[in-house]
Amino acid sequence: MSDPVVVVGVDGSASSLDAVGVAAREALLRGLPLRIVHAFGHPSGHVPHTAPWDPAGHSLEPMLHGELARAEERARTVAPGIDVTRSVVAGDAVRVLEIESRSAALTVVGHRGLSGLPELLLGSTAVHLAAHGHGPLMVVRGRPDPAGPVLLAVDGSPAGEAAVDFAFAEAALRRAPLVALHVWNTWSERAYEGPGDPLNAVVADAERLREAEQQLLDRTVAHREAAHPQIAVERRLVRSRIRPALLDASREAQLVVAGTRGRGGFTGLLLGSVGQALLHHAACPVAVVRGKG
């Protein structure tokens, strides 16, 4: 198996250059090399009328390597001294980055591509990598140079344990506090919400449910907190709808960490609802961590 690296996908867009800067900082924090990858190809089923990489008949190599040179310059400016390699790989960006992620400690992408449409990259690359890639994925979005705590979205699922571990590791690397946020309501056991669900739609013993959710949060955090005494941890239990509560909390965070599956147990459930909202609307970068189970 190859030695771990931080991988960042670039396509010449401003968003991907921002991703390079973030990826360089992440590589520096981890003491790992940075691998800058440009996938040369088109998404499956998309056949352009003209070749956008060669609009004026110029050769492909100078343009692509010019983009990579600019990306490498950004990386070395942000994190002087890191080991940087760059590569042009033939193939669809989704497939290329999925393969690259197999040897990556972290894969980083921007939140929009050259089209300027965030939905295009999120639909074809980031969401696919979150669901099918290997290892953690970081999508760079939101305000520039965000500060504040690492925000962990606690969902209480077995698959979410990997996200909890990653969030504590990130807080330690960044020497940042950690906010473990668990959002509950009377629909909590279903792990999803319809757009019109009132918070009290299911008649239940709300105080008993609140106590159970607090215990879940405490169980999730307790032994990691004991293993990382240097991290200031805030356990935050909020009765609200999940998506708006997380988006609001992201405004004060430098990174949001979430898993890919809620307690409902359906593969991709979080990506389909809460995760999609974070990837489209969070005020800071989002790390999606796939777990087992």
Image: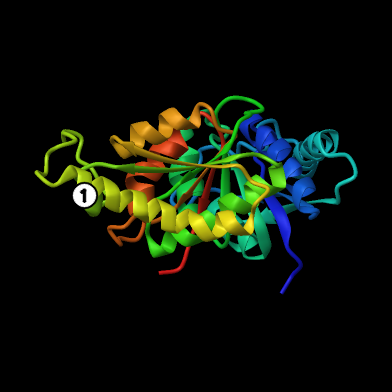
Q: Give the quadrant of residue 193.
A: top left
Which residue is identified by label 1?
Answer: 208
Seen at 22% across and 53% down, the residue is 190
Residue 225 image offset from top left, x and y in percent: 57, 54
Element marked by disc 1: helix
Q: For the C terminus, which image quadrant?
A: bottom left
Evaluate whether residue 132 shows in this view: no
Seen at 30% across and 62% down, the residue is 265
Question: Residue lying farthest left?
Answer: 203
Evaluate whether residue 203 shows in this view: yes
Front-most of residues 36 and 182: 182
Residue 147's place in the image compared with 134, above or below, is above
Front-most of residues 163 and 268: 163
Q: Residues within 10 Å of mark 1 (few under 14, many from 20)?
A: few
Residue 191's place in the image compared with 51, above or below, is below
Seen at 45% across and 31% down, the residue is 249
